[in-house]
Amino acid sequence: MEKTLAETLKDADPDLLDEILREAESRLSAQLTTAIAADTRAMTFLGFISAVAVATVGAGLATYTVNQQLGTLALFVGLGFIASAFFAFQAARPIDFDLIGNDPASWKKDILNGVSLHDAKAEQVAFYDEMLKSNRKAMDESAYNLRRAADVVFGTIAIGAVFAILFVGSIVPHP
Protein backbone atom coordinates (compact mmCIF):
# COMPACT_ATOMS: atom_id res chain seq x y z
CA MET A 1 0.00 0.00 0.00
CA GLU A 2 1.31 3.43 -0.97
CA LYS A 3 2.12 5.90 1.80
CA THR A 4 0.09 9.07 2.16
CA LEU A 5 1.89 12.34 1.51
CA ALA A 6 1.96 13.10 5.26
CA GLU A 7 3.54 9.71 6.00
CA THR A 8 6.16 10.25 3.28
CA LEU A 9 6.94 13.73 4.56
CA LYS A 10 7.46 12.40 8.09
CA ASP A 11 10.48 10.53 6.69
CA ALA A 12 12.01 13.74 5.32
CA ASP A 13 15.11 15.33 6.83
CA PRO A 14 14.02 18.14 9.22
CA ASP A 15 15.80 20.82 7.16
CA LEU A 16 14.21 19.55 3.97
CA LEU A 17 10.78 19.48 5.60
CA ASP A 18 11.28 23.08 6.75
CA GLU A 19 12.10 24.09 3.16
CA ILE A 20 9.06 22.22 1.81
CA LEU A 21 6.89 23.97 4.40
CA ARG A 22 8.38 27.37 3.53
CA GLU A 23 7.77 26.82 -0.18
CA ALA A 24 4.19 25.62 0.39
CA GLU A 25 3.45 28.74 2.46
CA SER A 26 5.08 30.88 -0.20
CA ARG A 27 2.95 29.26 -2.91
CA LEU A 28 -0.24 29.74 -0.89
CA SER A 29 0.66 33.40 -0.40
CA ALA A 30 1.34 33.81 -4.13
CA GLN A 31 -2.00 32.15 -4.93
CA LEU A 32 -3.80 34.62 -2.68
CA THR A 33 -2.08 37.57 -4.37
CA THR A 34 -2.92 36.17 -7.79
CA ALA A 35 -6.53 35.46 -6.83
CA ILE A 36 -7.01 39.00 -5.52
CA ALA A 37 -5.59 40.42 -8.77
CA ALA A 38 -7.87 38.13 -10.81
CA ASP A 39 -10.89 39.17 -8.75
CA THR A 40 -10.03 42.83 -9.30
CA ARG A 41 -9.70 42.23 -13.04
CA ALA A 42 -13.03 40.38 -13.15
CA MET A 43 -14.82 43.06 -11.10
CA THR A 44 -13.43 45.82 -13.31
CA PHE A 45 -14.51 43.97 -16.45
CA LEU A 46 -17.93 43.27 -14.92
CA GLY A 47 -18.45 46.95 -14.11
CA PHE A 48 -17.34 48.07 -17.56
CA ILE A 49 -19.34 45.54 -19.55
CA SER A 50 -22.43 46.12 -17.40
CA ALA A 51 -22.30 49.84 -18.16
CA VAL A 52 -21.82 49.10 -21.87
CA ALA A 53 -24.74 46.63 -21.79
CA VAL A 54 -27.08 49.16 -20.15
CA ALA A 55 -26.07 51.88 -22.62
CA THR A 56 -26.45 49.55 -25.61
CA VAL A 57 -29.86 48.25 -24.54
CA GLY A 58 -30.98 51.81 -23.79
CA ALA A 59 -29.81 52.97 -27.21
CA GLY A 60 -31.53 49.98 -28.81
CA LEU A 61 -34.82 50.76 -27.10
CA ALA A 62 -34.59 54.44 -28.02
CA THR A 63 -33.67 53.66 -31.62
CA TYR A 64 -36.28 50.93 -32.08
CA THR A 65 -39.12 53.42 -32.35
CA VAL A 66 -37.34 55.26 -35.16
CA ASN A 67 -35.63 52.36 -36.95
CA GLN A 68 -36.64 48.82 -36.00
CA GLN A 69 -33.73 47.12 -37.78
CA LEU A 70 -31.05 49.22 -36.08
CA GLY A 71 -32.90 49.09 -32.75
CA THR A 72 -33.13 45.30 -32.96
CA LEU A 73 -29.43 45.06 -33.77
CA ALA A 74 -28.56 47.21 -30.77
CA LEU A 75 -30.81 45.10 -28.52
CA PHE A 76 -29.17 41.87 -29.67
CA VAL A 77 -25.71 43.35 -29.11
CA GLY A 78 -26.86 44.51 -25.67
CA LEU A 79 -28.02 40.96 -24.89
CA GLY A 80 -24.58 39.68 -25.88
CA PHE A 81 -23.00 42.15 -23.48
CA ILE A 82 -25.41 41.02 -20.75
CA ALA A 83 -24.35 37.40 -21.37
CA SER A 84 -20.73 38.49 -21.07
CA ALA A 85 -21.55 40.30 -17.81
CA PHE A 86 -23.05 37.07 -16.48
CA PHE A 87 -19.80 35.19 -17.11
CA ALA A 88 -17.77 38.06 -15.64
CA PHE A 89 -19.98 37.86 -12.54
CA GLN A 90 -19.32 34.11 -12.36
CA ALA A 91 -15.59 34.89 -12.46
CA ALA A 92 -15.86 37.62 -9.80
CA ARG A 93 -18.18 35.87 -7.35
CA PRO A 94 -16.74 34.77 -4.01
CA ILE A 95 -15.09 31.36 -3.97
CA ASP A 96 -13.87 29.03 -1.25
CA PHE A 97 -10.20 29.84 -0.82
CA ASP A 98 -7.76 28.25 1.60
CA LEU A 99 -5.31 30.44 3.49
CA ILE A 100 -1.96 29.84 5.15
CA GLY A 101 -2.04 28.55 8.71
CA ASN A 102 -4.75 27.05 10.84
CA ASP A 103 -6.71 27.72 13.99
CA PRO A 104 -4.92 27.17 17.30
CA ALA A 105 -7.65 24.70 18.30
CA SER A 106 -6.47 22.51 15.41
CA TRP A 107 -3.36 21.70 17.46
CA LYS A 108 -5.30 20.25 20.40
CA LYS A 109 -5.39 16.70 19.03
CA ASP A 110 -1.65 16.75 18.20
CA ILE A 111 -0.83 18.00 21.69
CA LEU A 112 -3.03 15.38 23.38
CA ASN A 113 -1.50 12.63 21.23
CA GLY A 114 2.08 13.82 21.76
CA VAL A 115 2.74 14.36 18.05
CA SER A 116 6.28 15.60 17.45
CA LEU A 117 6.91 18.97 15.83
CA HIS A 118 8.47 17.21 12.83
CA ASP A 119 5.41 15.00 12.31
CA ALA A 120 3.07 17.97 12.81
CA LYS A 121 4.98 19.89 10.13
CA ALA A 122 4.69 16.92 7.79
CA GLU A 123 0.94 16.80 8.34
CA GLN A 124 0.71 20.58 7.83
CA VAL A 125 2.63 20.36 4.55
CA ALA A 126 0.30 17.59 3.35
CA PHE A 127 -2.65 19.77 4.35
CA TYR A 128 -1.14 22.69 2.42
CA ASP A 129 -0.78 20.44 -0.61
CA GLU A 130 -4.54 19.83 -0.58
CA MET A 131 -5.18 23.54 -0.07
CA LEU A 132 -2.98 24.43 -3.04
CA LYS A 133 -4.86 22.00 -5.26
CA SER A 134 -8.25 23.29 -4.08
CA ASN A 135 -7.21 26.91 -4.65
CA ARG A 136 -5.85 26.07 -8.11
CA LYS A 137 -9.15 24.45 -9.08
CA ALA A 138 -11.18 27.46 -7.88
CA MET A 139 -8.84 29.91 -9.64
CA ASP A 140 -8.96 27.90 -12.88
CA GLU A 141 -12.76 27.99 -12.84
CA SER A 142 -12.79 31.76 -12.32
CA ALA A 143 -10.23 32.27 -15.09
CA TYR A 144 -12.32 30.09 -17.42
CA ASN A 145 -15.39 32.23 -16.76
CA LEU A 146 -13.50 35.46 -17.38
CA ARG A 147 -12.17 34.06 -20.66
CA ARG A 148 -15.75 33.12 -21.62
CA ALA A 149 -16.86 36.68 -20.81
CA ALA A 150 -14.14 38.10 -23.03
CA ASP A 151 -14.93 35.63 -25.81
CA VAL A 152 -18.63 36.53 -25.69
CA VAL A 153 -17.77 40.24 -25.91
CA PHE A 154 -15.49 39.63 -28.86
CA GLY A 155 -18.10 37.49 -30.61
CA THR A 156 -20.83 40.03 -29.87
CA ILE A 157 -18.76 42.89 -31.28
CA ALA A 158 -17.77 40.88 -34.35
CA ILE A 159 -21.30 39.71 -35.14
CA GLY A 160 -22.75 43.13 -34.34
CA ALA A 161 -20.20 44.80 -36.65
CA VAL A 162 -20.99 42.44 -39.51
CA PHE A 163 -24.72 43.08 -39.20
CA ALA A 164 -24.16 46.82 -38.76
CA ILE A 165 -22.13 46.90 -41.98
CA LEU A 166 -24.83 44.91 -43.79
CA PHE A 167 -27.52 47.19 -42.39
CA VAL A 168 -25.69 50.40 -43.34
CA GLY A 169 -25.02 48.93 -46.78
CA SER A 170 -28.73 48.26 -47.22
CA ILE A 171 -29.81 51.84 -46.42
CA VAL A 172 -27.02 53.80 -48.09
CA PRO A 173 -27.77 54.32 -51.79
CA HIS A 174 -25.11 53.00 -54.14
CA PRO A 175 -24.07 55.07 -57.20
Image: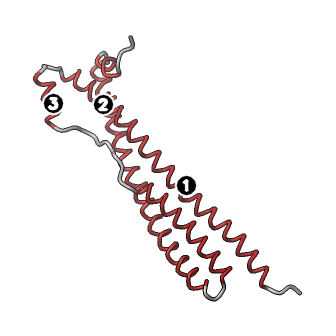
Secondary element under disc 2, as helix, strand or loop, is helix
Q: Position of residue 90 (x, y in %)?
A: 44, 55
Q: Which residue is mark 2?
A: 127
Quarter-of-image position of residue 19? top left
Decide: marks 1, 2 in contact (CB < 8 A)? no
Residue at 36% over, 15% down:
3
The numbered mark at residue 107 is: 3
Q: Earlier in the sequence, mark 3 or mark 2?
A: 3
> Which one is in front, 17 or 69?
69
The numbered mark at residue 148 is: 1
Tag 3: residue type? Trp
- 1 or 2: mark nearer the eye: 1
Q: Position of residue 123 (x, y in %)?
A: 27, 25
Name the image quarter holding the C terminus. bottom right
Mark 1: give few (<14), some (14-19) or many (20+) Cα within 10 Å.
Answer: many
Residue at 29% over, 43% down:
99
Inter-mark Cα distance, 1 to 2: 32 Å
Residue lying furthest left: 112
Q: Left or right of 152: which side holds 4?
A: left
> Which one is in front, 104 or 58?
58
Tag 2: residue type? Phe
- 3 or 1: mark nearer the eye: 1
Decide: marks 3, 1 in contact (CB < 8 A)? no
Residue at 74% over, 80% down:
168
Quarter-of-image position of residue 136? top left
Residue at 65% over, 75% down:
73
Secondary element under disc 3, as helix, strand or loop, is helix
Inter-mark Cα distance, 3 to 2: 13 Å
